[in-house]
Amino acid sequence: MAEPAGVSAVARLASLPGVSTASGVAASAVHAQATGRVLPVLPALAELLPWGGLRRGSTIAVHGSTSLLLALLAEATASGSWAAVVGIPRLGLVAARELGVEVSRLALVPRPGADFASATAALLDGVDLVATGPPGRFGGTQTARRLSARARHRGAVLLSLGPWPGAEVELRCAPVSWSGLEKGHGYLREREVVVDVAGRGAAARPLRTSLLLPGPGGVVASAGAAARPPCAPAEEVKVG
């Protein structure tokens, strides 16, 4: 019998330089083809996405917040899906765990170098969600379009930390304030952020919402009802 495509792709990935925590992926690659066209997200994040979750085959760009990127992986990995992160060397596993990511189902390729495109393509063949650094560092627009097409064909979700040509949804996150300090002392407990959503197709109408990232107990929470921005569209929001 022929070897399943997902398993062979992950086996190829394991031979690439720079792989650090992908050793358990091959044994669980079959699970990466979980049924259902939309992978779940935390309740506070569902309103950010036109499908109420992460639609298989889609490409989503996250601007200005590694925490938001990790939070998008949390519910799916907790529900049994596998995820991978490519080309984001400073991603923290402790922070990922605190935001709800099941790190035992998270593969890391922190410094793929010239193998960025091949490593990302192999992962898109074998796992449900692949998060990457912006393609401009590794190959530019043509590489981005090929990888988005790969995600559509394989039914994976591709997420970018930074701009990605042709992304269907753009999430731009800007911090507003921290809370927790009282009279100059204490602990920072909650951070309010504003997220602007824009994109194509079902996400063409701009959306703005406030989140607590992190919220009470470290869990992502809604800071208020979603609102349509009266003036500035999402692309005019500056993320420092």
Image (cartoon, grey):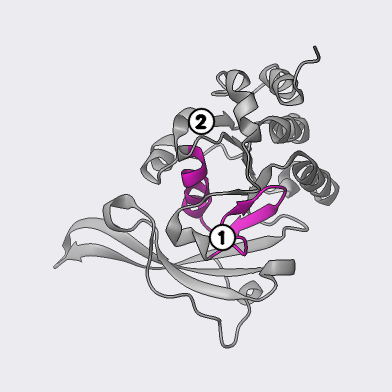
Residue 103: percent from left, percent from top:
46, 32
Badge 1 amino acid:
Gly
Image: 121 above or below 62: above
Q: Secondary structure at mark 2?
A: helix
* Corner quadrant of residue 118: top right
Instruction: Please give the name of the residue rendered at 59% of the width and 56% of the height, measured from the top-left corner.
Output: 62
Badge 2 amino acid:
Arg
Residue 24: percent from left, percent from top:
55, 20
Is residue 197 found inside the magenta-colored segment of the image? no
| Horizontal arrangement in the rendering, residue 141 relative to residue 6 (left or right) | right
Instruction: Please give the name of the residue rendered at 70% of the width and 52% of the height, measured from the top-left corner.
Output: 59
**Badge 1 density bin: few <14, some 14–19, many ≥20, Cα 10 Å:** some
Instruction: Please give the name of the residue rendered at 60% of the width and 68% of the height, measured from the top-left corner.
Output: 197
Tell me the number on the disc at residue 52: 1
Image: 151 above or below 165: above
- Check disc 2 and report the residue beneath it: 105
From the viewer's side, name the closer residue of 236 and 155. 155
Which residue extends farthest right? 142
Instruction: Please give the name of the residue rendered at 20% of the width and 63% of the height, measured from the top-left corner.
Output: 181
Residue 133: percent from left, percent from top:
64, 45
